[in-house]
Image: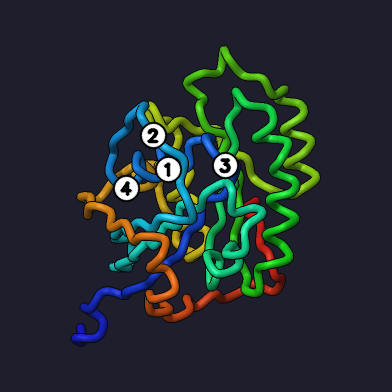
């Protein structure tokens, strides 16, 4: 085996979490990156950035750059900057908060006008641990996501239920990597997330675009 074959393949993937304030975007990211949860939280102003390293089958080293974008950015002037060269978009809503679901249509419409590169998208309904407090009818969500051709994943930041597998499924889908059920749930040792102050976003070097084969449309939705 040659030296080049023994070397792992390094990739960089940019993931953005979008949605109204207080739907749990930061909590979902921290659960995925750091496996921690706290009930005490504040709304994100601007955007925070996290990194996490994964090793996928085929010796693929993947560095995730995860953008936690504040809910107020829907009407802000920086959203297009935060979404520059993004690869995966996760729209988040709270199943116990109907307005957060109702605003998804505007989020999706706004993002579609800003994205210039092919992306993979999905929706995450947070707080499945509070299913008994659900305020959004399931038939309503099913109809909406069918119309949008958008996959809907019900997850929990508090318990971590379905979160890792849902994110890993998106990553594998984008990269064209097959993951077993065990691999989707498995967590590599966590590299503590690095938070970049929102004011530093324009000073960060632009990452090299990720090779994205077999995408022929502007937006690719996970089936």
Q: Which of pointers 1 and 2 lies earlier in the amino acid sequence?
A: 1
* Image height of 217 relative to 110, above or below: below
Relative to 212, 168 lies left or right: left
* Secondary structure of the residue carrying numbered label 4: helix
Q: Which residue is mark 1?
A: 26
Residue with the most extreme top position: 132
Q: Residue at x 66, y 74 (%)?
A: 116
Place of residue 141 in the rendered image (x, y in percent of width and height, measured from the top left): 72, 32
Q: CA distance from mark 3 to mark 2?
A: 16 Å
Pointer 4 residue? 33
Q: CA distance from mark 1 to mark 3?
A: 10 Å
Report, in whole angstroms, how far the alpha carbon at label 1 lies from the one at label 4. 10 Å
Q: Position of residue 150 (x, y in %)?
A: 68, 48
* Residue at 45 percent of width and 62 percent of height: 177
Residue that carries the numbered disc 3 in the rendered image: 92
Residues under labels 1 and 2: Cα distance?
8 Å
Marks 1 and 3, the one that precedes in the sequence: 1
In-front residue for pair 131/23: 23
Quadrant showing the N terminus: bottom left
Residues packed near mark 4 inside 10 Å, few (<14), some (14 to 19) or many (20 plus): many
Helix, strand or loop at mark 3: strand
1 or 4: mark nearer the eye: 1
Q: Measuring from the top left, give residue 149's x and y in whole percent.
A: 74, 49
Residue 41's mark?
A: 2
Q: Earlier in the sequence, mark 2 or mark 4?
A: 4
């Amino acid at each position: 085996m040659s030296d080049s074959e023994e070397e792992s393949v390094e990739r960089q993937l940019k993931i953005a979490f979008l949605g109204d304030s207080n739907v749990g975007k930061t909590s979902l990211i921290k659960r995925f990156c750091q496996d921690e949860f706290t009930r005490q939280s504040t709304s994100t102003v601007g955007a925070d950035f996290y990194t996490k390293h994964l090793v996928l089958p085929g010796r693929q080293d993947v560095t995730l750059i995860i953008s936690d974008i504040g809910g107020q950015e829907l009407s802000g002037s920086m959203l297009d900057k935060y979404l520059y060269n993004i690869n995966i978009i996760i729209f988040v809503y709270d199943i116990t908060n109907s307005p957060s679901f109702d605003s998804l249509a505007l989020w999706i419409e706004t993002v579609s006008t800003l994205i210039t590169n092919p992306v993979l998208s999905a929706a995450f309904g947070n707080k499945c641990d509070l299913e008994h407090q659900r305020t959004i009818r399931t038939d309503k969500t099913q109809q909406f996501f069918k119309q949008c051709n958008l996959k809907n994943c019900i997850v929990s930041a508090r318990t971590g239920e379905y979160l890792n597998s849902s994110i890993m499924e998106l990553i594998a889908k984008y990269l064209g990597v097959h993951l077993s059920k065990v691999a989707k749930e498995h967590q590599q040792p966590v590299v503590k997330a690095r938070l970049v102050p929102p004011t530093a976003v324009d000073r960060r070097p632009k990452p090299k675009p990720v090779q994205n084969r077999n995408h022929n449309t502007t937006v690719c939705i996970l089936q």
